[in-house]
Structures are given as structure tokens and as C-alpha cells.
Amino acid sequence: MTAAPDVSAAPGQVPVAHGLAAPPAPWRLLLRKPTFLIGALILLFWIACAIFGRAIAPHDPLAQDLLATNSPPSGAHPFGVDSIGRDVLSRVIVGARDILLIAPLATLLGTVLGTVLGLAMGYFGGIVDTLVGRVVEAVLALPVVIVAFLFIVAVGPSPLTLIVVVGFIFTPLIARTVRTAVLVEGQQDYLASARLLGERPGYIMFAEILPNVFPVIVVEFTVRLGYAIFAVATLSFLGFGVQQPTPDWGGDIAANYVLLGAGYWWETLFAALAIASLVMALNLVTDAIEQVISS
Amino acid sequence: MTRYLLRRIGLAIVTLWILSVIVFFAGQVLPGDPGRAVLGPFASQSAVRQLDHQLGVGRPLVTQYLSWIGGLLHGNMGFSSEYRSPVAPFVVTAIGNSAKLAVLALVIIIPFGIAGGVLAALYTGRGVDRTISLGGLAASTVPEFVSGIVVIIIFGVALKVFPYPTGSLSGLSAPSQLDHLILPVIPLVLVLFGYIARMARAGTIEALESDYARTAILKGLPRSVVIRRHILRNSLLPTITVIATQTGYLIGGLVVVEQLFSYQGIGRLILSAATHKDFAMLEAGVLVIGIVYMVATLIADVLYTLLNPRLRVGVSG
């Protein structure tokens, strides 16, 4: 299996010559990109919903109005009412919370573990590298969803299980990227001088190499975050994530999609659009960050 | 080549063995009691214990694993506690149904993905490229059940042009089966399109910038000939490996899509087995998926070596 060609570089992006002026700070470059602004705005909207959801929501997302079950969108319920009489708009707003908590935490876990592992693999090389490499290969040889599924079936579904399982699955993937970045750094003079000064391996790895491979880790984190949302939403839909009656986009779709045949589209469409908009927003932000870091 | 093949097959067998161990022990720590799951909450404790004994639940784990794997090697997949009958016929029917869906997805996605990627590469940086690249990226990161819901609402509920839910295909004519499979195949195609197009684009750009492509252009070959004979051959190489690595995503996608469309495939089978604590069914289903995945990766690796003369020489020595 050969490494895939690098596709991260954006087409038509020519590095701008800055002359004598100092290059602008990276975040200024980001703010100039309209795609970044649109993405960030949507992300902020969902983060606000995640934090203040209960206060913003027009109804209690758990309250059941049994006289209004399956009623279509109306003035009182702009997104309609679901099969057991709960306001869909309120559930979509409050439903942002769990996925926006679980996906970033899972990605963070995977990134921290993957970085430590990747640093060790890249720095020590030899037996450590080969041994961990074999295990990574074995893990990657299995379809990811099946692995996640088996572990959650074994341990029992809960938000914590989701975080740990998705984090563990990301660990070898992130380790591989960090390892490659460390190998590139390995040729630099500052490492040779650190070694000659007799610095300890732990110090060299975390104080010398880590700051230099940090941009790679940032990009990896943002890319993985997108996959984490994909995985968490999917596992929730399959019934292995947030359990009903807690509002959750994937879980709510799972609870109501059987009614699509009866024409009750509003019970699933808005949660689906919410997931899609979150994923698209993250894509726009990731794409912009990648372009700025690589330029 | 032979040595390389043997090594790859050996590795695949080792990975399968690891998978069988994981599957078996994951099934064992499943909370709940298979006997109780079959007989329901009102059965007497002694009846539950007797069924557990029949199913061999109480024996040491290693013994259970050995008898399970021994049975598998003799073609005996075990006995379903949910349906009270052998597992094999269920798995065979389900894998056949999933294969129809997966093959249809691949038949659509491979030409479209490659064509999209090559087109984007030929117009790098222009509108066509940005549309295909960003659109593909967006499509590949939206979960299958999300695009599936949208597709169902538009074509199944509002326009009613395709049947939903898909249900069982048995007894339907081939065109009618195709009609039923169109909706579930769309989410699978959307997710895979982005990856395959991106790889085809990267491969084509690399080939376009190569010395041999420049030579071919400079010696006056028509552009279409250069693209067909020099660019495509090289750009398709990485794409083939990518399609194989996507088999895992495709299988994951099948679990989701089959559930959403109530289609009796292998994904829905193992999902229902997991919720009904039907160990034998779950273990057999996951292992069969593992085998399919392994074989697909193996075929792709072999194809890659066959199509790449440099590798072919390298490994035969």
C-alpha cells in the first residue's frame, strides 16, 4: 500500500510575497477568507445552541403533548411535532449539545494518545516503531465501523463509551501522521545538538520536537473532528450512542425515520439538516485552516 | 510475485484470526443471558438454565472458542438463538442482498468518481475543479443516514418516484429490483464519490506534471491521446488502491443504509443479532464481513502490483 499523493494543497494558491513587511498573523489571514467566516458562523451558532439550548428552545424538548402527535410544522411548532408529541425545533436546538461534547472530546483523546505514540515511534524508531506499526496495521485492517460497533456492543452504549471507542480508533491513525512529521524533523540540526547536550528523550520529544510538529497536529485534529462527528452521529443513529429520550440528532432520526413512509418528513428532516450543516461548516473551517498553515 | 502473494495471504489470515478472537470475546462480554433473551422475561429460571446448557454457554471460554472456530472450519456457522435454526442460510441470503447493493454502488461510483477527478485535474483551480473538489469533500463527510433521509423525503415521500422502504427483493424481476435499489445506493455513492474523485484528481495532476507527459505533448501527440495513453494509466493506479481501502467505509455504510431502508443485508443482520444477543449470528456475520474485506484488499494489492511494472520487478527478486 503506497502513501496516497498529497491532496491537501489547494489549487491555485500561490504564496503571496510580503516584501519587507512582516507576514500577517495566521488568524488575520483566516479572517480574510469568506469560506472560513461562513463556516465559523454556523459553528458558533451550534455551539451557542449546545450551551444555551434549554434557554433558547421555545418548548421543553422532553415535554409530550399527546394531543398534537405527528402534527406538521405550524406557528406554534415551526418544525412540527414528533410521534410522541415533542416539539421538533426544541429537540434540534438542544440536540446540538451531546454531539458537540462527545465528538471533540473523542478527537482530543485520540489526538493526545496518537501524538504521544507518534512521537515515541518517530523518535525511538527500531523495535518500538516496528512493534507499534504492526498493531496499527492490524487495527486498520478491520472495517472501522465494525470495530466500534463490537466494542460498544461489548461495553454497553453510553456517551463515555463513545468517546473512548472513537478516541481509541483515531489513536493509531493520528500516530501514523505524527510519526511521519517527526521523521521529517529528525534530520534537523537542533535535534542533533539537543542530543549532544545530553537532553533526556522525554524532554527532546515534548519540548523540542512537539512545538515543531504542532501545526501538523492542529490540521490532523480539525480533519479528525469531522470524522468524529460522522462516526458519533452514525453510531447514535444505530442505537449505540446517546439514548432516548435525551435529545440527539442521530438518535431522534433513528426514533422517527420509520414514520417517513407515512409522510411525516418533518420529524427527521430538520435533525438531518442540522448534522449536514455542522459537517459542512467544519469542512469550510478545516479547509481554510489547512490553506493558511500550508501557505 | 508468488512470494509477495503468499506473504499477503499469510498476513490476511493472521488478521482474520485476530478478528475472530475479537469478535468471539466481544460477543462473550455482551451483557445479558442468551437463554433469557430467547425465552423472554416470563420463562422459569430452570428452563433458561437448561437452554443455556444446550447452547453451551457455561463452558470455559477457550473451549467455546475452539469448538466455534472448529465448526466454522467445517462450514458450520453455529445455531441462532433468535431464530432457533442454523445461522448459515441467513448469512448467505443477507450477504447476497448486500452484494447487490455494494456492486451497484461500485458500478456507479468507479466511472463517475474517476471521470470527476480527471475532469477536475484537467481544469485545476477553475470553477469545475472547485465545484467537484468541494462538493465531493462535502458529500463524503455527510453521514449516509443523513443524505439517505433527504433522498427518501425528496424521491420516496414527496415525488414518490422510487419505492420506500426497500424491503425484500425476493420474487421481483431484475428491473424492479434495480428500481428498489436506486434510493439506498445514492447515500453510498455520495460518500465514496469524494474520496475516489480526490485520489483520481491527485494522481492525474501528478501525471500531468511528469516529464513523460511533457515529452508526449512536446512531440506533438494530440491532447486526447496523451491523456488516454500516458496520463490515465498512471493516475488510475492510486485510485485503485483507494477504492480498495474504501471497502471498509462501504461496509460501514451498508450497515447504516440497510437499517435506514429496511433492507435485509448483512449489516442489518449483525445489527439485529447484536440487539437480540444472538451471539452465533453476530460472530458469523462479522467474520464473513471480515473475510470479504480481506479479500477485497488482497485483490486490490495484487491488481496494483500487476498494473505497476516497477513494483512487479521489485517484489519478484
Image (cartoon, helix red, strand yellow):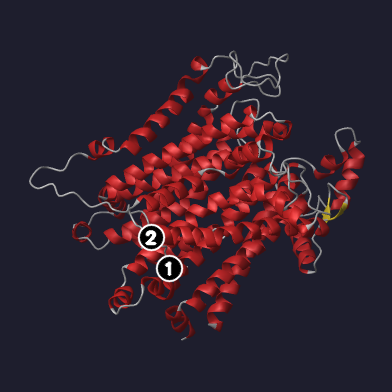
Q: Who is closer to the viewer here, A92 or B178?
A: B178
Which dot marks residue A33? none
Quadrant in which residue A62 is drawn: top right
In this rendering, position of residue A150 left or right of residue B208:
right
Q: Which badge, 1 or 2, comes first in the chain's sequence? A: 2
Q: Who is closer to the viewer here, B141 or B2?
A: B141
Which dot marks residue B235? 1
Tag 1–tag 2 contact (CB < 8 Å)? yes
Q: Position of residue B92 (x, y in %)?
A: 78, 60
Q: Position of residue B230 (x, y in %)?
A: 40, 75
Which three-letter amino acid code belongs to the residue tagged 2? Answer: Ala
Which three-letter amino acid code belongs to the residue tagged 1? Answer: Ser
Q: Secondary structure at mark 1?
A: helix
Within 10 Å of disc 2 (Cα), the crowding (few <14, some 14-19, many 20+) is many
Q: Who is closer to the viewer here, B197 or A149?
A: B197
Q: Which one is in front in this view, the residue at disc 1 or the one at disc 2? A: 2
In this rendering, position of residue B50 left or right of residue A189:
right
Residue under numbered circle 2: B121
Residue A37 in sight: yes
The answer for which chain carries disc 1 is B
Between the residue at mark 1 and the residue at mark 2, the CA separation in whole angstroms equals 10 Å
